[in-house]
Image (spheres, grey):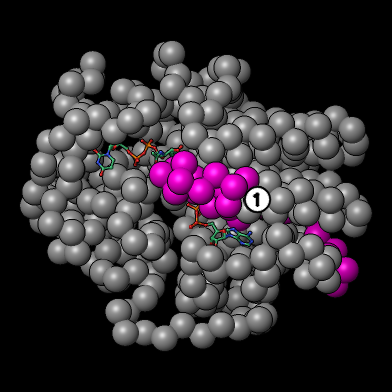
Amino acid sequence: MSSTDKVILVTGGAGYIGSHTALLLLEAGYKVYIIDNLDNSVEEAIERVAKLAGKYRKNLFFYKVDLRNKDQLEKIFSMVRFDAVVHFAGLKAVGESVAKPLLYHENNLIGTLNLLDLMNEHGCTKLVFSSSATVYGQPKSVPCTEDFPLSATNPYGRTKLFIEEIIRDVQKADPEWSVILLRYFNPVGAHQSGLIGEDPRGIPNNLMPFVQQVAVGRLAELSVFGTDYPTRDGTGVRDYIHVMDLADGHIAALRKLFTGAKGCSVYNLGTGRGTSVLEIVAAFERASGKKIPLKFIGRRAGDSSEVYASTEKVERELHWRARYGIDEMCRDQWNWARENPWGYRAPDSMQQSVESSRF
Ligand code: NAD
Ligand code: UD1
């Protein structure tokens, strides 16, 4: 069977990483069914994916469903036979998870349990799951390899840790299952068209969307969290990865599953290179021609000084490596920001809610 015959369920496909991955899946010839409750996204993102997909748009389907609603989910599984699932859907704001742990455990865990149960029932046993570098807790050294000890420092991270373990149990119980857990480092950037990108609700928690909103004048200045880390310029170092590279990592993972990979494997998706906060700011200023005013404040609680990935395993086994550097990440982030300073939502736009659509 070629990829053209394969049908992929993409949960959370209206979101930031899901929308970029859905586009690459379509372009690779897959049929893509997106399920999303639009809790942290809008249908416009899927419409833009359809537009970018051109002749492949006929292979894109969307259902507005909450994974916690098992009856609705069951209807979709009864209607369509999925060859594999790419599971992005989940809540991801660390601070919010500390304030609302039950919401995070309920949404991320119950949603995943429903999904796994229905996959079992309907004989769909191939899964790619969005995990996070957060499962390394505060790593004792860098680069992080996949066999590092795992821990969580907040409820969001704990949901990722628990889901990884649950999936391992499911796969052990039934060796028919083949699973790839992908641990993302810091996804940034946008599709080169500037049509799709990250559109956080409220004030962004993460560095790049914050910098972007300062550049377009939505926020006045960037607070730099900590200048006394043992790094080259005293600010925190992270492994930023272009979202298109990240999306491509999912294509590589599916290829591996469809060529007979067995068991449950885990891979880092990062570049293997660390970049400091001040280096990001400088690169964004170069890309945008905008000055980013800075305020230097104390460290953010729970932050590590330096986190970046070992990419040896993913390069060796999935034959994947990141292609883009910081300058391209900032170029594409700025392109998206400039074209869509308010994200998908013009300040006065009305969003329609549609139960299901074919594009
Ligand atoms: P996102 O919020 O843009 O996308 C997640 C999507 O899931 C949203 O569209 C949301 O509406 C949907 N969703 C949430 N709960 C749902 C539910 N119960 N039923 C149906 N849909 C639901 O986030 P993203 O940045 O695209 O992240 C995708 C995945 O990758 C998440 O699981 C996230 O934890 C993980 N991840 C993200 C990052 C990051 O920095 N962006 C880093 C590591 C891991
Ligand atoms: C975040 C998540 C983490 C997730 C990771 C990868 C939080 C608290 N943690 O962490 O769970 O695994 O992304 O997606 O959200 N910074 C500033 N000013 C800001 C924002 C950030 O100086 O306004 C600094 C931070 O201190 C850090 C760097 O920028 O050094 C990156 O921060 P961020 O984008 O939040 O990513 P992580 O800290 O890796």
State the residue in front, 135 or 281: 135
Residue 271 versus residue 87 in the image, above or below: above
**Residue at point 90% right, 36% down?**
174
Residue 23 versus residue 136 in the image, above or below: below
Relative to residue 241, is residue 9 drawn left or right? right
User: Which structural element holds mark 1?
Assistant: helix
Q: Which residue is mark 1?
A: 106
**Residue at point 58% right, 34% down?**
158
Q: Is residue 186 visible?
A: yes
Q: Residue reaching furthest top?
A: 140
Q: Is residue 104 magenta?
A: yes
State the residue in front, 147 or 269: 147
**Residue at point 30% right, 57% down?**
203
Amino acid type of the residue tagged 1 in the rendering: Glu
Q: Quadrant of the C terminus?
A: bottom right
Measured as percent of width and height from the top left, residue 348 is found at 31, 84
Asked whether mark 1 and ligand 1 are closer than 8 Å, the reply comes as no
Measured as percent of width and height from the top left, residue 290 is found at 10, 56
State the residue in front, 348 or 184: 348
Tag count in the figure? 1
State the residue in front, 271 or 71: 71
Per the rendered image, the range of residues in magenta is 77-105
**Residue at point 76% right, 54% down?**
115
Residue 25 versus residue 180 in the image, above or below: below
Q: Quadrant of the N terminus?
A: bottom right
Relative to residue 209, is residue 286 drawn left or right? left
